[in-house]
Image (cartoon, rainbow, N blue to C red):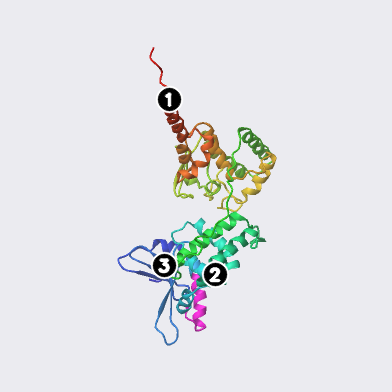
Amino acid sequence: MQKKITKRNVDATEVEARDVFVWDTEVKGFGLKVTPKGRKVYLLQYRLPGTSTRRYTIGVHGAPWTPDGARNEAITLLSQVLRGEDPAEARQAIRADPTIAQLCDLYLAEGVATKKASTVSADRARIERHLKPLLGRKQLRSLARADISRFLSDVSAGKTAVDERTRKRGRAIVRGGPVAANRALATLSAILAFANERGLRADNPVRGVKKFKEGKRARFLSNEEIARLGEALREAESRGVNSYAIAAIRLLILTGCRKNEVLALRWEEVDLSSGALRLSDSKTGAKQVLLGAPARAILAELPRQFANPYVICGRTPAEHLVGLQKVWVGVRAKAGLCDVRLHDLRHSFASVAARSGESLLIIGKVLGHSTAAATSRYAHLSNDPIRVAVEKTASEVGDMLRPARKAK
C-alpha cells in the first residue's frame, strides 16, 4: 500500500500473517515493513545501474527513529545512490572494522530499541560530547584498555568541557569531573557490548578499567531547614515568582518524587479522588505515588491551562516547565541552603519518614526503589528492622552469657 508515512499511520498499520509494506508517497523507495511479530522497521528500496533492486534497513520504529527522522535518512541515502554509491556496501565496510564514531552511530540506530527515551537521550549526549571528540577516529579493533583509561582521565580533567548556546533559549553546559567520566565510561561499555553481540569484537576492553570513586552526595534537610525552605517559598510566591515552579518545588519535598516525575506529570495521571499519582513511566517503570493532604491541596488549587496536558505548565503552549533550576537557585539562597540540590528534596522526604520510625521496606515502597540497596542510605536515620533484629539477638545472647541465678 502507499500512503504518507506518519506516526499515526505507523501506529495504525495492523499486523498480519505475512510482512506488510507501506511505501511513502513523498520519498520514492522509503518504506515501512511490519513483520508478523509486530516489529516495525523503516527501510529504503533502491537500484543502482546494472544491479537488481536492493533493500536497506534504516532502523526499528521508536527511539531514535521517528517517521520524519527515517525519511531524512532515506533522502541522505538516496543522494549516495545518485552518486553511484551503494549504501549497503558502505555499511558492510563500516561493519568490518568501524571507527568508534561509526560504531556509536550504529548503536544509536540499531542498539537502543528497548531502552527508555530518556536513557537514549543521555547516551546520545555522552556520545556527542565525550566519546566522539576523544575516541571517534579510533578503529574499534585497535581500541585498547590504555586508550580507555586515558579517555576516563581526559573526561575527568575537563578536556571535553564546553559552555555554548544550542538554540534561542537553550544552553549546553558540559563539565568534566569523576562522575561525568564514570557515566561516559558506562555508555562506552554498553556500546562495546553491542559490538560483541554483532560479532564486531570478541572482548570488551572497558572491563577491568577502574572507575573513579564517587562520594555519597545524599543531603538531608533538618526540620529547621525545611521550615526555612517553607518561608523562602512563601516569600518567593509573594514576589510573583512563577507559581508553577513554586508548586513543583513543594511537590518534590511533599511526595519524594524525582524532578522529571513532577515536571512531566500529566493531569490524566492525577487521581485526586483516591489521592494518588498513577505515573505511566518513571526511572523504574510505571508506578503509583500516594499523596498526602498537603500535596493533594497543591494539585487541587493549581490552575489548569486549556490544551496543556501538563500539571506544571511552561511558557510554551502544551509544554511543561523548563528551567526550574533557576528558580530553585534563588529560593535556596534565600533559605540559606546553597549546597542543597533539587534531588535532595526527595532524600529529605525519605529522611523525615526514617526519623519518624518508618522501616526501610516502607520507605523503599514510598520512593519506588527497585532494590533494597537503593534505600540503605537511610538506614542510619530509621528504626531499621535489621538493627532491631541485632538488638534483640544480642540481648538474648547476653542473657545466656550472664551467670545463672542460684536458687534461694
Where does label 2 land, which residue? 101
In front: label 2 or label 1: 1
Q: The residue under label 3 is which amino acid type?
A: Val
Q: Position of residue 366 (x, y in %)?
A: 48, 39
Which residue ends up furthest to the left in the rendered image? 17
* Distance (Cα) linking label 2 and label 1: 67 Å
Question: Is residue 5 visible in the rendered structure shown here?
Answer: no
Q: Position of residue 386 (x, y in %)?
A: 45, 35
Tag 3–tag 1 contact (CB < 8 Å): no
* Distance (Cα) linking label 3 and label 1: 70 Å
* SS at circle 3: strand
On-image quarter of the N terminus? bottom left
Tag 2–tag 3 contact (CB < 8 Å): no
Ranked by sequence position, the earlier of labels 3 and 1 is: 3
Q: Residue at x 31, y 68 (%)?
A: 18
Q: Which residues are magenta?
A: 71-87
Question: Is residue 249 visible in the rendered structure shown here?
Answer: yes
Image quadrant in which you'd find residue 155: bottom right
On-image quarter of the C terminus? top left
Magenta residues, dominant SS class? helix
Say which mark, if any, is on residue 46: none
Ranked by sequence position, the earlier of labels 2 and 3 is: 3
Q: Position of residue 211 (x, y in %)?
A: 55, 56
Q: Is residue 325 left or right of residue 406?
A: right
Q: Nearer the viewer, residue 282 or 377?
A: 377
Q: The residue under label 1 is which amino acid type?
A: Asp
Q: Position of residue 215 (x, y in %)?
A: 59, 48
Which residue ends up furthest to the bottom in the rendered image? 50
- Where is 338 relative to 176, above or below? above
Where does label 1 land, which residue? 399
Say which mark, if any, is on residue 41: 3
